[in-house]
């Protein structure tokens, strides 16, 4: 199956307001964590844990809730690349770009993955099935190169195994879509 990119989650176009669900997630994170020292990062992780992304429109809400400036919040979100700005696809595929994995061929693997999916890092396929992200060490260096798909880590990944993994995920997607 050929894929193409639908959007870049990291492009970060500002939306005008938060949805009800986004608002609830943001407020829950702030209320649960605002009394902690250095609450900003935990709040951002909490929001992403709930929504799978941090809405750009949440920046002023977070800033106000934590007595910070919008620039403070925006700066941290921009610095840590793991924070997404929009919802990811149904499956998030992360390829490790850290040293051990690079030495075992992750650069070649990521080229294969980009070609196979028709997207680059921080993009999602048009069918919304896959988002591709870089990651920097998954703690699985002994089995480099490593890939994480959603919550599962796979080691010693080859192009062929990546294709098998993708086919397996596609089968799951089709099964979920069937009545
Ligand atoms: S360097 Fe890739 S898992 Fe550690």
Image (spheres, rainbow, N blue to C red):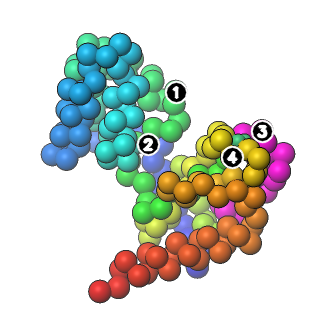
Give the x, y percent position of residue 160. 74, 72
Looking at marks 2 and 3 on the same chain, the residue that comes earlier in the sequence is marked by: 2
Badge 1 density bin: few <14, some 14–19, many ≥20, Cα 10 Å = few
Residue 55, image quadrant: top left
- Tell me the quadrant of the picture where the C terminus can be found: bottom left
Q: Can you tell which of label 2 and label 3 is closer to the viewer?
A: 3
* Marks 4 and 1, how far apart at CA: 24 Å
Against 33, residue 90 (above or below) is: below
**What secondary structure predominates along the stretch shown in magenta?**
helix
Queried whether the magenta region covers residue 109, the answer comes back as yes
What kind of element bears circle 2? loop
Proximity of marks 1 and 2: CB atoms separated by less than 8 Å: no
Looking at marks 1 and 3 on the same chain, the residue that comes earlier in the sequence is marked by: 1
Give the x, y percent position of residue 156. 75, 58
What kind of element bears circle 1? helix
Against 170, residue 122 (above or below) is: above
Residue at 59 percent across and 60 percent down: it is: 119
Give the x, y percent position of residue 58. 28, 33
Q: Which residue is mark 4?
A: 140
Q: Can you tell which of label 4 and label 3 is closer to the viewer?
A: 4
Label 2 CB sits under 8 Å from any ligand 1 atom: no
* Marks 1 and 2, how far apart at CA: 12 Å
Q: Which residue is mark 3?
A: 99
Q: Which residue is mark 1?
A: 79
Residue at 44 percent across and 29 percent down: it is: 77
Q: Which residue range is magenta in the image?
A: 98-115
Q: Can you tell which of label 2 and label 4 is closer to the viewer?
A: 4
For this orientation, the residue located farthest to the bottom is 179
């Amino acid at each position: 199956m050929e894929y193409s990119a639908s959007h870049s989650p990291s492009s970060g176009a500002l939306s005008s307001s938060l949805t009800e669900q986004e608002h609830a997630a943001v407020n829950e994170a702030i209320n649960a964590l605002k009394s902690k020292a250095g609450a900003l990062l935990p709040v951002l992780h909490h929001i992403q844990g709930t929504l799978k992304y941090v809405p750009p429109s949440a920046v002023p809400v977070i800033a106000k809730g934590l007595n910070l400036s919008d620039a403070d919040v925006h700066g941290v979100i921009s610095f840590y690349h793991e924070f997404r700005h929009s919802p990811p696809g149904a499956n998030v595929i992360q390829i490790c770009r850290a040293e051990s994995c690079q030495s075992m061929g992750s650069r070649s693997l990521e080229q294969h993955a980009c070609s196979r999916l028709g997207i680059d890092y921080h993009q999602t396929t048009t069918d919304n099935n896959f988002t591709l992200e870089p990651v920097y060490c998954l703690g699985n260096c002994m089995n480099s190169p490593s890939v994480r798909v959603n919550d599962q880590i796979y080691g010693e990944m080859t192009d062929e195994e990546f294709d098998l993994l993708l086919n397996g995920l596609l089968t799951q997607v089709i099964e979920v879509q069937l009545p």
